[in-house]
Amino acid sequence: MNPENKNFFQKVYEVASQIPEGRVTSYGAIAKYLGAARSARMVGWAMNSAGSMEHVPAHRVVNKAGLLTGKHHFDGTNLMQQLLENEGIEVIDNQIQNLDKHFWDPFKELGVEE
C-alpha cells in the first residue's frame, strides 16, 4: 500500500471511530467529509482493512441506501447485521430501516474538515 493510501485510510479510521453507537454513516459521507467526494470506494477498502481494529466500528459504515454492502468482510454470515441490531438498528433484507433516523453526517457532527 502506498503512503498516500495509508494516510487516507488513517483519516477514514479517525472519522469512523467517532460514529456513536446506534448510528450509521455511508462510505460517501466519509469521503465527502475528507474532501475526496469521489473516493467512496476507497473508504470501503479502508473499512475492509479495518478488520480487527476494535476502535473502528466498521459495521456502522454502509452504502448510501443503507445496504450492508460490507457484510461479507465480517466473520459469520450475519455478524454485521447482528452488531447493528444489538445497537437498536433494525435491518431487513440487508438494509437499514429508517436510515434517516440513524444516519450520522460527519459534516453536521464533526464540523468542517480543515
Image (cartoon, rainbow, N blue to C red):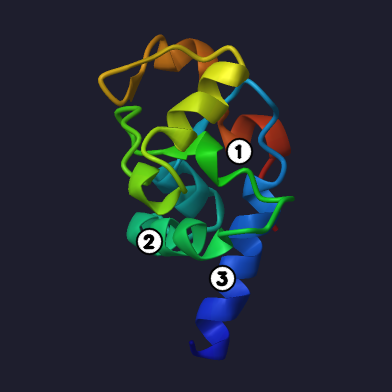
Disc 1 to disc 2, how far (Cα)? 15 Å
- Residue assigned mark 2: 39
- Residue assigned mark 3: 8
**On screen, residue 90 above or below 93:** above
Residue 39 position, x and y percent, is 37, 61
- Mark 3, residues whose alpha carbon is within 10 Å: few (<14), some, or many (≥20)? some
Residue 55 appears left or right of 26: right
- Residue assigned mark 1: 106
The tally of labels here is 3
Q: Nearer the viewer, residue 58 or 82?
A: 82
Tell whether label 2 touches label 3 (CB within 8 Å). yes
Q: Which residue corresponds to the image point at 46% horizontal and 42% vertical from the top-left?
A: 29
Q: Which residue corresponds to the image point at 62% horizontal and 47% vertical from the top-left?
A: 16
Residue 86 appears left or right of 20: left
Q: Can residue 38 be seen in the rendering of this structure?
A: no
- Mark 1, residues whose alpha carbon is within 10 Å: few (<14), some, or many (≥20)? many
**On screen, residue 73 above or below 104:** below
Amino acid type of the residue that numbered disc 1 sits on in the rendered structure:
Pro
Residue 37 position, x and y percent, is 40, 55
Q: Which residue corresponds to the image point at 45% horizontal and 11% vertical from the top-left?
A: 90
Q: Which mark is residue 76?
A: none
Residue 53, image quadrant: bottom right
Q: Secondary structure at mark 3?
A: helix
Instruction: Work out whether mark 3 precedes mark 2 in sequence or the reverse, and give the earlier one.
Output: 3
